[in-house]
Amino acid sequence: MRTFNLSDIELTKYLFFTGKGGVGKTSIACATAVGLADNGKKILLISTDPASNLQDVFNQTLNGHGTDIQEVPGLTVVNLDPEQAAAEYRESVIAPFRGKLPDSVIQNMEEQLSGSCTVEIAAFNQFSDFITNADKAKEYDHIIFDTAPTGHTLRMLQLPSAWSTFISESTHGASCLGQLSGLEERKGIYKQAVETLSDANATRLVLVSRPEIAPLKEAARSSHELQLLGINNQLLVINGLLLQLDEADSVSKQIYDRQQTALKQTPAELLDYPSYSVPLRSYNLSNIANIRRMLYDDNLTDNADYQRITDAKGIDELVNDLYQSGKRVVFTMGKGGVGKTTLATEIALKLTKLGAKVHLTTTDPANHLNYNLAVQAGITVSRIDEAEVLEAYKNEVRSKAAETMTAEDMEYIEEDLRSPCTQEIAVFRAFAEIVDKAENEIVVIDTAPTGHTLLLLDATESYHKEVQRTHGDSPASVRKLLPRLRNQQETEVVIVTLPEATPVFEAERLQKDLQRAGINNKWWVVNACLSLTDTENSFLRAKAQNELTWIKKVEELSKGNAALIAWKNN
């Protein structure tokens, strides 16, 4: 695998960087933009990442129109705020109906338009103007987008039927289609944008991953989705490859071995594309100087004053609090790859040791060892087959929708059923049934629904009460569970994150999402902390030092209720 070097790569007019949260796509997009500008090119960098910290990186105020970067001649940065765009878009759709429809219907519309799909569509709405702008194409040598649209969003925008008519008549209860209301007049622009995206001479898609199994699988899934749309001009960048192996240091040896094992298991879909690597860096990529050298070097400084963390709260404090406060339902919540499944198992084992009767339920089929330990400890274990419950839910929605919808409208249903929200709703319904049967146990669940999904289920229920429609009804178990989740005496959502910028920003958004849904969250867990290990590797010690900023931020967000877990090879 070659090192990511700008002079070795065939670059097109448009470059899109995409990947799972936390893999470093913003850093690599910035390093590419700065490197090309330093080589005399005129560059437009556009970020649609809600967790963007570009203002800090470039140390100046940015906006959605374009700001010239003083320290990088030739570079202009546009920092689109998709959350703000989504809020404006949401209000533009709903405003005509305020005062004319019942409050419960307005509430339903608001929630339909509050999910991740809305944010993505609002972002695409904005940057489609840039990708179809002929003046911008002439002015800049390269236009770089940080965070590409998913295949799901692009397919949804390509669907042929009249969106507004469909949406106004839809009652099937699925999750993404409401986001399309009000976009009818932009269909021509979207068509042009999608054509540009699929033109190999104009566009290159850069899939960013870490040398870890979960991000590589996510990159493969994105790659496949985009291939289906004819977007085949792709390349893979593996970010964060450990080169400073110290055989005498067990932590660095374990990290190195784990990375190499993951790379050997790279999904077949990615093997056909050119692949490059960027070394793991010891420094935070939070200023221009560090972005500038990210692709080239790592000037390691001696951290003689570094002290590992020794006084942090641990899992025992968290579990004791759950037990003593009498919680009945415990969710571990966080983005993929932060370790919530392993944590859920550990919480269940520790609660059992304290004398509680525990039911552990999960959607992760891979963690057999932990399950065996749980069963041996007397814990009731149930596993939800995600694919099975999703297909059952899809079939239920299809059969109800088919009673009233045309074949053309069913296309929408099929696309909507591919959305992340649909999967979340299907799994949550299965969880609700388990919790409903487990009245006399503490139920520990390793995948929590987002606040949006909960509010969507709730709003849909209210809507149905108002208009007496039958499609997509929530089962009784879900209706019972929603108020239970809002009862902080009974329920705790443990937010799990990593000591890095993007996972912490994403966890902060999850916290706000839960607050919006009226769900209590007291405890946070910061997983995989190098700063709790006894590594003597100077490179890893520098990384550990840089974790402290993010651990401090979590301490603030959790009001001091943060449990830290040391990095370990699991």
Image (cartoon, rainbow, N blue to C red):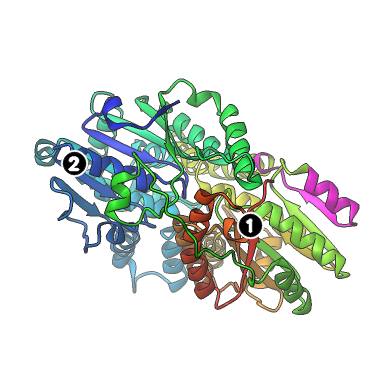
Circle 1 residues within 10 Å: few <14, some 14–19, many ≥20: some
Q: Judge by depth and name the residue closer to the eye, 394 or 404.
A: 394
* Relative to 248, residue 562 above or below: below
How far apart in space, not on screen, are marks 1 and 2 (Cα)? 39 Å
Based on the picture, tell me whether residue 42 belongs to the magenta stretch.
Answer: no
Q: Please tell me which residue is depicted at 37% across the width and 53% down the height of the picture.
A: 285
Q: Which residues are magenta?
A: 369-387
Question: Circle 2 sits in a helix, a strand or a loop, which is it?
Answer: helix
Amino acid beneath label 1 = Thr
Residue 274 percent across, percent down from the top left: 40, 23
Q: Please tell me which residue is depicted at 90% across the width and 51% down the height of the picture.
A: 376
Q: Nearer the viewer, mark 1 or mark 2?
A: 1
Question: Circle 1 sits in a helix, a strand or a loop, which is it?
Answer: loop
Q: Relative to residue 36, is residue 181 drawn left or right? A: right
Residue 446 percent across, percent down from the top left: 68, 55
The residue labelled by disc 2 is 38
Residue 68 percent across, percent down from the top left: 14, 53
